[in-house]
Amino acid sequence: MTPRPTLKPTKTLHTNTTTAAPGFLPSLLDRIPLPRWAIYAIFAAIILVILICVICCCVKCCCKGKKNRKKKLDQKISMKGISGTTTAALVQPETEDLEYGSADQQRGKLQYSLEFSSSTSELTVGIKEAAALKAMDSGGTSDPYVKVYILPNKSKTFETKVFRKTLNPVFNEHFKYQIPQKELTESTLVMQVYDFNRFSKHDIIGEIRLNLSTVDWNHVIEEWRDLSEASKHEQEHLGEICFSLRYVPASSKLTVIILEAKNLKRMDQGGSSDPYVKVQLILDKKKWKKKKTSVKKRTLNPYFNESFTFEVSFEQIQKVQLVISVWDHDKMSRNDAIGKIYLGCDATGNQLRHWADMLSNPRKPVAQWHTLLSSEQVDTTLALKHTLKIPFTNKAF
Ligand SMILES: *[C@@H]1O[C@H](CO)[C@@H](O)[C@H](O)[C@H]1NC(C)=O
Ligand SMILES: *[C@@H]1O[C@H](CO)[C@@H](O)[C@H](O)[C@H]1NC(C)=O
Ligand SMILES: *[C@@H]1O[C@H](CO)[C@@H](O)[C@H](O)[C@H]1NC(C)=O
Ligand SMILES: [Ca+2]
């Protein structure tokens, strides 16, 4: 009796394993309570659905490719227009700096912090990071930086560093304003995100305007906010200027070539402008050296190509401020320049970048376009820097 039960299980086990493989599918189909033809029809339907999906995906991909090609063609055409300008030989537009973004795209968002100390009347604005910024260049990226200022007294504009080729820059920079608490209630903080372009006007990606009277100053504020379209009326356009800088440490020679200016602001309606450019060096808070270009008659897009060389030692180049200003020759009564900018080791943003490029490429001329700022704004910034330096210089003497 004992051998049988031990044999039987092993035998059934054996037959099970051998017949399982070939008979698996038919036996499975037998177990489904449907006729064979119905099962085959279901299989056919599933395969058909998969095929349709694959075809849809292929068609979509092809369409995208065509759109991209069309965009590239548009860029080629606009590049042709740009390279027709006078300094084409000196300054070529970087292809990735050409306009790209479409109007309906999201501008992205910015994280900032605000803190006010009523005992010191100090407002600290932190520019933390931005995310999902709109792409302004053809590579599908931007070169973002942030400008910060306070209205209605547009006294000082701060700029963060420029981040190359990113849509999610982490700035982590803090800027301080001296402002009485009473003035806070009638002030608006403006934070604008720009796309840097070496050889063309910087594009504004978007901005945030904060009515400071609505802020609860009992807490440190840190928040994300979506960027909105920049308000047009306030972006005063003064014009742009292109010049090249060259420094030769061995011979202590700083050469500034004023190349051209464009889209200069008309100083009075109907009247024509006769622009010229002043090149000035400031050293230790004093006007040190000054030169001027010739006057170009009746134009808002003057071409100069005039070169100025100054003797500046290697020690001086690290302290000097180069002030470039555009003036209208007709306006004898007016003291203000059409626009101004300054460069130097203590400059910010685009201007600092040009200065640093010059210093890191000795003997090579480096050309760049700059957007002119109001002369009051630049003068205030220069004056502010001087007052801030007073305690330091006192210590030194
Ligand atoms: C603007 O500045 C002037 C002069 O410094 C000051 O009298 C005025 O209160 C300021 N206004 C605001 C809103 O900050
Ligand atoms: C800021 O908000 C206050 C109160 O809501 C309002 O009275 C004031 O006009 C606003 N200021 C600006 C510049 O929008
Ligand atoms: C600019 O001036 C330099 C030297 O004066 C000259 O060699 C060059 O041809 C000029 N460029 C143009 C485009 O006029
Ligand atoms: Ca750019």
Image (cartoon, grey):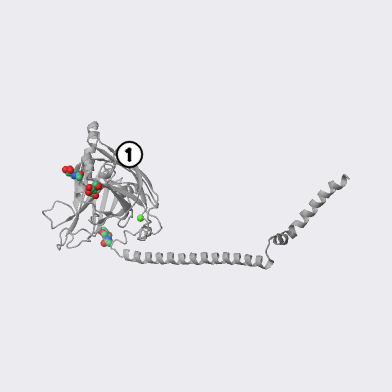
Q: Report the quarter where the N terminus lies.
A: top right
**How many other residues sit within 10 Å of disc 1, few (<14), some (14-19) or many (≥20)?**
few
Res 284 seen here: no
In x, y percent, where is residue 38?
65, 67
Q: Position of residue 393 (x, y in %)?
A: 23, 34
Above or below, comparing residue 210 to residue 31 in the picture = above
Q: Residue at x 63, y 65 (%)?
A: 42
**From the Cβ of disc 1, is ligand 2 less than 8 Å away?**
no
Nearer to me, 384 or 303: 384
Total labels: the figure holds 1
Counting from the top left corner in percent of width and height, residue 239 is at 24, 57
**Left or right for 168, reference 259:** right
Residue 104 visible (yes or no) = yes
Residue 273 location, quadrant: bottom left
- Along the viewing direction, whichever of 375 and 155 lies nearer the viewer: 155
Q: Residue furthest left?
A: 333
The residue beneath circle 1 is 220
- Residue placed at 80% from the left, 54% from the top? 15
How far across and down, in percent of the image, does residue 33 sit? Answer: 68, 62
Q: Nearer the viewer, residue 143 or 46?
A: 46
Task: Name the amino acid type tagged 1.
Answer: Val
In the rendered structure, the answer to whether residue 326 lies left or right of residue 164 reads left
Circle 1 sits in a helix, a strand or a loop, which is it? loop
Going 67% across and 68% down the picture, which residue do you hit? Answer: 37
Q: Nearer the viewer, residue 164 or 154?
A: 154
Q: Is residue 243 above or below residue 76?
A: above
In this view, 315 is above or below 136? above
Q: Quadrant of residue 264?
A: bottom left
